[in-house]
């Protein structure tokens, strides 16, 4: 039954992707035609949590070719998640703001959600069909309140030159991963795999455990509702994921003490990888998006550059998973000034051409159905659709992700046993 | 130098000049840009001062609050209440948070909950590290721009540590919206209105961020769009946050911008940045205009020079060809002259030699003399033509206009051409049409020359039995006071080939044809004619077809002389005119009617006889009958004979002919003709002849063959050359004129000094003579005291035949000019003219 559900799911995703791809070609052939007065003089502000958003600023410049007098700017808000509501109620109302799936249904963000415009409104003429359906969230009323601009996935950065140097092949299965780690260990590498381990947010343990847990839930639809409802009975479905974390640690694939030296889950992770002595750095695609820019900031990498890619961790003997979930999403503040021009900008942005362009600059995985991948992400192009899972399609809710994240973190740091962690499902904060 | 090298040198000079202008412009442009950049940097420094003063002012307010709160041991609520009362700015607020928890109160409530004054900086990552906040009064403790947790506005905060009641450490934040600052933060200079400002901290993070500044850190922004290696980046960024200067960089659009930076002195590690697109900075584009203008100018000059160089080269080539051609022409000319002069000279010398050997053979001598005379005349014509063409080509041909009768000119033309026409038995006709103005004002000699040249050519190149026709007509001229005289000569002669026509007016060009090899000519006639027509502003046209004939048409606008014959009217009489030539008949009828006559016309002798007989029978005789000589059926003489013999009419009859009538004069008189008329029939000719026949006007013209009036005249001849003296004295003696010789000018003057009054009738004076020339002698004679001697007529008789020579003679005081070789008829005419004037 589970198998049948899984197969149907994969077929549906594939059919949707194919259908979207066909349509998208038609859409791509369309050239953006301004629908408003191109002399319009106004301002549009996008607020978010990124320190930098060069990819979006490049889109501003492109949009200015059509509307030269529209002043677009990106602004990072401090303590974004807490201040967003205040900002939306304040005097400097942003036009577009970053949103996340977990905001939906979260009471704390009810006021935020109330500002979101329904982007499925046909009058807006947005080309939603260019985005992979699994990445589009709809509320209970079928409204699309946020649209993904990037896709997040989980995996590891691989120093390909180091593998070549040591004469080792890239691991494609779980057993190969363990043996490869052992081989590196024998060659003097204290921690063949590394990652951020100091806090649970974006920790390497979650990066290993989450895809396995999601895959488990995909195989067991009856467990999904239990897990979403934080029912302790769902804890058992974490076992295989937690065992994988435990096995990685016990096999000395990861030296936690070494990983603890990495003091943040983004820049420091990248710079540590660029030191050139880490064969595999476990992280999310959000972290990978910062690598290009930081190449020049790393003296070690500048001196001895090497080839690297981002690949799924081979968590099973069949290989790894491509967890296709939205990274950041954009919502339009329906109460903002210049709403027409804001909708016009969103119409400009939501196209295969522009979304792919942004993903290329960032670089991150594009949310579009044609999904051209940057060379760094090339290994994900080899993953069969049967191993591609969209949590949004499955219906995974955010509170579920907290449970697996904290459980994996504690197991990985040996603060809990696997059984203890399973037993505590639903109680992690 | 070859043309290509000239072009290369020109292009190189152009490139060099353009390079110079370009370099000079660039240098000047760079200087201007540097000055503007310096100005921009100074303005940035000024902005830093202004900003710093503003920030200091705001910080002082915060300092005052902190001092007061510290001195009063207030609780958090009391401190907030105090500040709420103290500050007045509508959009400013203050936050006080405990240093340990980073939580506290705001002076303003949240918008959506007016009772909520709580504020937290726990997650703001703003006050976690407060090392940048110094003791009160030491520095401007200003935060970076951050999101105000109470109202969500981007704000900056002026901070101070304060101590609240119970010694609780807290942080006081005077919070101002960035928008408030941005409104005041505008470049004062208009030329920098597109400049944007930012403030960064020592790590490059923006404290306040201008729109064109991207990323969260300026250093990140710079690295994103500009190349900078990791090694030198730290040094570069350290320089930006520690000194004042400018540099250029690319912005997010790839545009080149100028960035000025200057550090704040009273805010730890902050730097003011101003960024402006380079295009907005460069306002001086005139240099490019200059380069463009110089480039176009040089190009135009180059093309202009090149064109002219090519043009002059072409001209030079043409000139060279012409020079070569002229040289060849000169050689050809000499060769031709040699041939053309030697030919008649050969005849003269040869025949003279033959005559000397056969002095006893009178007939042979007479024949030889006739041939010598012909050869001499040809030689004279040749020399005259050469002189004329040389005068024309040297531009020395001057016209001497005088009043003349076109009738006389035509008569002269007829007289000259008659012998040739008669000799060659050519059918000749001369039509005139509407010739109303008889007297014109022009150079008669040259006009004659034009007309005679064309007519003699026509006769010369027409074979015996052919025909030559002259049409002369008067038309209205577009020039005021002139008539347009058209002179058209058509012949049925040998014609000309198209090749010959192309060079028709070239000197020494003669149509060669087996039929005309014997035709003598200089080959200069048409060249002279053309030049003269051109000089008289006329047109000459030629149509010719080889073997069929030629037509020349000369059109001249000639001034009308003041003197005209008026009142040429006769009593109304009946006149019959008879001619087979319809054109002549119509023209003659018009002319006769204009004289007041009643004219009837007959196109042949028989018709005329009928008309005369009819009149005779009715007793209404014609008053005068004019009959053409040559007519079909019966000719003019036969017609007259029948009028007289058969009709017995005594009506006066005039015989008209285009030919000389000496041969038929006796026959005609016997037939009963009363007088002769020469074609063409001018109005005055008809008037004079009819008047003469009717006895209304006496003929006053002296008979040409009567020279009795010249007998007894004594003429002094100044001539140094014996043969010339012998010729002129002999010729004059033939007319009964006696002569005395003066061998030079001095002798002539002496003779006049000593002569009695009336001894000499006039003097013929040669010009070039030894001791004293003719001109000086004339001046000396004119200076004599004796009035008779000083006023005696002096006629130049000289080989100096050019117009300027004539003018020179007249200026010296002479009364006339006769060119050698002398034509005795002209000499006699001149003597008579002088004699008439002396009467």
Image (cartoon, rainbow, N blue to C red):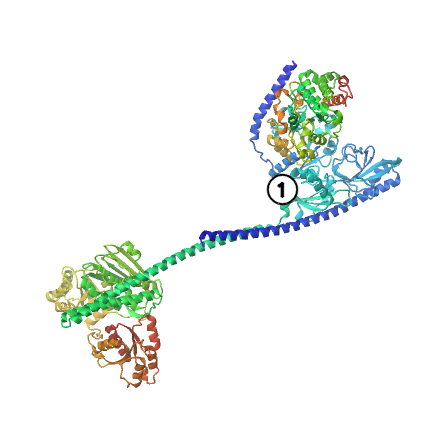
**B3 in relation to B680, above or below:** above
Q: Secondary structure at mark 1?
A: loop
Which quarter of the picture shows residue B816? Answer: bottom left
Q: Nearer the viewer, residue B625 or A164?
A: A164
What is the x, y in percent for residue B175?
78, 39
Visible residue check, residue B296:
no
Where does the N terminus of chain B fall, quadrant-wise? bottom left
What is the x, y in percent for residue B40?
68, 48
Q: Nearer the viewer, residue A187 or B400?
A: A187
Instruction: Name the residue beneath numbered marker 1.
Output: B255
Q: Nearer the viewer, residue B474 or A106?
A: A106
Q: Which residue is farthest front?
A: A187
Which quarter of the picture shows residue A321? Answer: top right
Which quarter of the picture shows residue B659? Answer: bottom left
Q: For this view, does B219 lie left or right of residue B666?
A: right
What is the x, y in percent for residue B713?
24, 81
């Amino acid at each position: 039954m589970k198998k049948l559900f899984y197969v149907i799911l994969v077929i549906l995703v594939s059919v949707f992707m194919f259908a979207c791809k066909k349509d998208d070609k038609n859409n791509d052939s369309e050239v953006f035609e301004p629908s408003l007065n191109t002399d319009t003089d106004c301002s549009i502000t996008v607020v978010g949590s990124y320190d930098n958003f060069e990819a979006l600023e490049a889109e501003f410049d492109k949009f200015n070719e059509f509307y030269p007098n529209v002043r677009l700017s990106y602004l990072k808000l401090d303590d974004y998640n807490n201040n967003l509501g205040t900002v939306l109620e304040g005097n400097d109302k942003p036009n577009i703001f970053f949103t996340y799936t977990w905001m939906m249904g979260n009471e704390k963000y009810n006021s935020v959600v109330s500002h979101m415009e329904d982007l499925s409104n046909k009058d807006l003429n947005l080309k939603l069909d260019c985005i992979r359906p699994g990445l589009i969230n709809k509320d209970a009323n079928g409204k699309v309140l946020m649209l993904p601009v990037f896709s997040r996935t989980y995996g590891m950065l691989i120093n390909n030159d180091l593998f070549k140097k040591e004469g080792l092949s890239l691991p494609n299965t779980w057993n190969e991963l363990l043996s490869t780690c052992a081989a590196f260990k024998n060659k003097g590498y204290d921690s063949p795999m590394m990652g951020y381990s100091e806090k649970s947010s974006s920790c390497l343990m979650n990066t290993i455990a989450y895809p396995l847990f999601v895959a488990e839930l995909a195989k067991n639809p009856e467990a999904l509702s239990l897990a979403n409802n934080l029912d302790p009975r769902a804890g058992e479905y974490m076992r295989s994921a937690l065992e994988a974390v435990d096995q990685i640690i016990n096999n000395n694939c990861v030296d936690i003490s070494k990983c603890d030296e990495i003091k943040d889950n983004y820049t420091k992770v990248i710079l540590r990888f660029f030191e050139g002595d880490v064969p595999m750095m476990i992280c999310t695609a959000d972290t990978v998006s910062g690598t290009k820019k930081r190449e020049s900031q790393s003296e070690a990498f500048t001196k001895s550059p090497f080839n690297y890619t981002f690949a799924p961790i081979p968590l099973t003997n069949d290989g790894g998973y491509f967890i296709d979930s939205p990274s950041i999403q954009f919502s339009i503040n329906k109460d903002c000034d210049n709403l027409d021009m804001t909708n016009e900008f969103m119409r400009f942005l939501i196209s295969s051409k522009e979304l792919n362009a942004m993903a290329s600059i960032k670089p991150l995985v594009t949310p579009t159905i044609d999904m051209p991948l940057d060379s760094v992400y090339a290994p994900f192009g080899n993953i069969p659709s049967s191993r591609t899972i969209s949590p949004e399609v499955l219906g995974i809710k955010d509170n579920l992700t907290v449970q697996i994240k904290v459980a994996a973190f504690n197991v990985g740091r040996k603060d809990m046993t696997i059984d203890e962690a399973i037993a505590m499902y639903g109680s992690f904060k | 130098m070859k043309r290509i090298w000239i072009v290369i040198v020109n292009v190189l000079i152009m490139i060099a000049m353009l390079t110079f202008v370009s370099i000079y412009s660039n240098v000047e442009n760079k200087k201007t840009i540097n000055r503007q950049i310096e100005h921009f940097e100074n303005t940035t420094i000024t902005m830093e001062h202004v900003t710093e003063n503003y920030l200091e002012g705001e910080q002082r307010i915060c300092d005052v609050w902190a001092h007061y709160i510290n001195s009063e041991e207030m609780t958090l609520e009391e401190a907030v209440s105090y500040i709420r009362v103290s500050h007045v700015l509508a959009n400013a607020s203050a936050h006080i948070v405990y240093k340990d928890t980073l939580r506290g109160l705001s002076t303003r409530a949240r918008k959506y909950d007016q009772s909520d004054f709580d504020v937290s900086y726990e997650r703001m990552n703003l006050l976690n590290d407060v090392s940048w906040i110094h003791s009160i009064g030491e520095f401007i403790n200003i935060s970076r721009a951050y999101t105000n947790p109470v109202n969500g506005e981007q704000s900056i905060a002026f901070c101070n540590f304060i101590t609240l009641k119970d010694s609780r450490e807290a942080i006081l934040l005077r919070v101002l919206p960035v928008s408030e600052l941005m409104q005041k933060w505008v470049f004062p200079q208009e030329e920098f209105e597109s400049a944007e400002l930012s403030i960064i901290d020592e790590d490059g993070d923006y404290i306040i961020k201008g729109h064109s500044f991207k990323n969260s850190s300026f250093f990140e922004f710079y690295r994103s769009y500009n190349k900078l290696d990791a090694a030198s980046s730290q040094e570069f960024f350290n320089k930006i946050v520690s000194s004042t200067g400018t540099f250029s960089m690319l912005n997010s659009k790839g545009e080149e911008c100028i960035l000025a930076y200057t550090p704040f002195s009273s805010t730890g590690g902050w730097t003011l940045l101003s960024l402006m697109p380079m295009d907005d900075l460069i306002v001086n584009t005139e240099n490019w205009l200059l380069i463009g203008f110089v480039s176009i100018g040089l190009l135009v000059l180059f093309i202009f020079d090149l064109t002219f160089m090519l043009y002059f080269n072409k001209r030079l080539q043409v000139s060279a060809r012409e020079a070569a051609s002229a040289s060849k022409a000169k050689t050809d000319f000499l060769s031709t002259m040699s041939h053309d002069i030697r030919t008649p000279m050969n005849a003269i010398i040869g025949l003279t030699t033959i005559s000397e050997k056969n002095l006893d053979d009178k007939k042979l001598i007479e024949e030889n003399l006739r041939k010598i005379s012909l050869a001499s005349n040809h030689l004279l014509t040749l020399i005259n033509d050469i002189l004329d063409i040389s005068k024309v080509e040297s531009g020395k041909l001057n016209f001497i206009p005088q009043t003349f009768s076109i009738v006389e000119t035509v008569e002269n033309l007829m007289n000259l051409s008659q012998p040739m026409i008669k000799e060659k038995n050519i059918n000749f006709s001369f039509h005139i049409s509407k010739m109303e103005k008889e007297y014109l004002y022009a150079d008669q000699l040259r006009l004659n020359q034009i007309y005679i040249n064309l007519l003699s050519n026509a006769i010369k190149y027409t074979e015996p039995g052919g025909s030559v026709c002259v049409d002369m007509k008067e038309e209205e001229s577009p020039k005021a006071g002139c008539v347009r005289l058209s002179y058209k000569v058509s012949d049925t002669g040998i014609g000309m080939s198209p090749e010959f026509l192309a060079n028709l007016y070239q000197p020494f060009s003669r149509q060669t044809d087996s039929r005309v090899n014997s035709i003598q000519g200089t080959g200069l006639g048409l060249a002279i004619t053309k030049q003269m027509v051109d000089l008289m502003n006329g047109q000459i046209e030629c149509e010719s077809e080889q073997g069929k004939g030629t037509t020349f048409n000369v059109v001249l606008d000639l001034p009308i002389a003041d003197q005209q014959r008026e009142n040429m009217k006769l009593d109304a009489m009946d006149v019959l005119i008879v001619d087979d030539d319809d054109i002549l008949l119509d023209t003659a009828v018009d002319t006769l009617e204009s004289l007041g006559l009643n004219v009837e016309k007959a196109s042949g002798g028989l018709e005329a006889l009928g008309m005369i007989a009819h009149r005779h029978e009715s007793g209404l005789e014609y008053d005068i009958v004019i009959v053409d000589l040559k007519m079909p059926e019966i000719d003019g003489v036969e017609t007259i004979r029948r009028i007289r013999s058969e009709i017995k009419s005594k009506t006066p009859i005039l015989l008209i002919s285009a030919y000389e009538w000496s041969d038929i004069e006796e026959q005609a008189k016997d037939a009963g003709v009363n007088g002769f008329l020469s074609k063409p029939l001018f109005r005055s000719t008809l008037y004079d002849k009819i008047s003469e026949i009717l006895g209304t006007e006496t003929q006053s013209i002296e008979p040409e063959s009567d020279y009795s009036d010249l007998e007894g005249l004594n003429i002094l001849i100044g001539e140094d050359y014996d043969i010339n003296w012998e010729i002129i004295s002999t010729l004059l003696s033939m007319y009964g004129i006696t002569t005395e010789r003066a061998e030079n000018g001095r002798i002539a003057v002496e003779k006049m000094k000593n002569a009695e009054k009336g001894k000499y009738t006039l003097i013929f004076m040669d010009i070039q003579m030894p001791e004293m020339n003719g001109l000086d002698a004339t001046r000396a004679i004119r200076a004599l005291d004796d009035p008779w001697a000083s006023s005696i007529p002096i006629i130049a008789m000289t080989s100096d035949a050019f117009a300027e020579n004539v003018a020179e003679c007249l200026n010296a005081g002479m009364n006339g000019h006769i060119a050698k070789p002398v034509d005795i008829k002209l000499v006699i005419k001149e003597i008579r003219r002088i004699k008439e004037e002396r009467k």
